[in-house]
Image: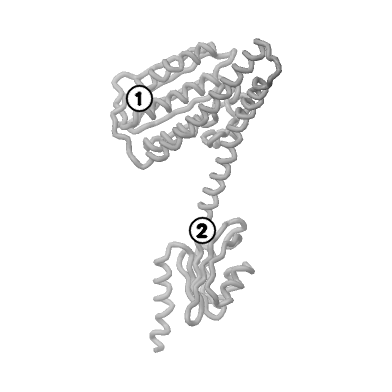
Amino acid sequence: MDRGAVQEPDVATAILDAIDEPALIVRRGIVAAANHAALALLGRQAVGRDLRFAIRHPLALDTIMSGQAADIELVGVGSVDRPWLMNVRPLPDGALVRLADRSDLRAAERMRTDFVANASHELRTPLATITGYAETLADEGPVDDGMRSRFGVTILAEAKRMLGIIEDLMSLSRIEADRFRMPDEQVDLGEVARIASEQCGVLAERRDCTVMVEIEPGLPRVAGDFAQLLQLADNLVANALRYGCNDRSCTISVNVNADGPHVVMAIRDSGEGIPPQHLPRLTERFYRVDPSRSRDSGGTGLGLAIVKHIVERHRGTLEISSTVGEGTTVSVSLPAA
């Protein structure tokens, strides 16, 4: 019996260590056993100590010491703002306590909430304009031809803007649905860059800007989805034209080169550049450095988010570097097939 009593904590610890999240056994207010995750969270000296010194959280302590089964959400164990789901299950002479980290779930919920709010805002703005102008045109009072024409042009522009947002949202959804399926086409990234630059010709003329394309000869192909890579290149070239052309510089360069086992496409402009504090957030959905300027230029705020997801699906890397007053370079590196 004595030998079993000595061995019991070791057996209990071995069982607890099979659990990934922090787990501990409490007997008569003392931490009798804890796994590695619990010791990392509560301190290496937690075993054998009073529970009140290991978990300094009133609600958690009351729940554990009640002797009843419970599942509660709490914040403040281990760090000030870390959320947990605590499971307490009674044992014959104590309780089994497990802590499931809810940080990722909380972050995902916050991202979903922000996304819905941002999408609603982006769609509500043009919809409000369309509604107001349509109500004016629907009134029985006379409307002169000039006003009718101006209102019609505005309604059409705002409707196209809404359509662009919806199309980009649908595109994001399709890309995310395919993110675990590796692309299986053999794609010439240089040809993709050339086609995207040609497709942006109208925008280049409108911005009075020139797109210079340089492609290294003999490049290997990449394993990719041609349509998605073309969308990626089109978004990057269009962004450079919208935000990188000014009176000082009116040339956008698109270069495709080999870099070891990778093929790199780099789009450079000599525009105003982007302040460093904005760079980490550029690939967030609907994030804009200058919201008013982005809307005026016809951007939906989703272009770089789409680029990021396409690069991730192709197991590549995306790098954005910028210097205020000098310009911006966006580089996409994809593994050669």
| Residue toward you, 249 or 103 | 103
Residue drawn at 57 percent across, 26 percent down: 323
Spot the residue most to the right.
141
Are circles 2 and 1 on residues that touch, CB within 8 Å? no
For the question of whether residue 276 can be seen, the reply is: no
**The residue under label 2 is which amino acid type?**
Asp
Q: Residue at x 39, y 89 (%)?
A: 1
Q: Residues within 10 Å of mark 1 (few under 14, many from 20)?
A: many
In this figure, which colouring scheme has been used for the structure?
one colour
Q: Which mark is residue 231?
A: none
The amino acid sitting under disc 1 is Leu
Which quarter of the figure is the C terminus placed in? top left
Q: With respect to residue 176, does 148 lie above or below?
A: above
Q: Assign a secondary structure to mark 2.
A: strand
- Residue 189 has which mark? 1
Q: Place residue 245 in its image quadrant.
A: top right
Say which of 5 and 140 sits in front: 140
User: Disc 2 designates what residue?
Assistant: 101
Q: Position of residue 236 (x, y in %)?
A: 47, 25
Q: Nearer the viewer, residue 322 or 294?
A: 294
Task: Specify whether residue 67 is in view.
Answer: yes
Q: Is residue 190 above or below residue 276?
A: above
Tell me how far mark 2 sits from mark 1, CA to CA.
42 Å
Q: Residue at x 39, y 84 (%)?
A: 4
Image coords of residue 255 (percent x, y): 41, 21
Q: Residue 268: x, y in percent?
A: 48, 22
Q: Residues within 10 Å of mark 2 (few under 14, many from 20)?
A: some
Query: Farthest residue in the bottom direction?
Result: 1
On screen, residue 137 above or below 144:
below
Q: Earlier in the sequence, mark 2 or mark 1?
A: 2
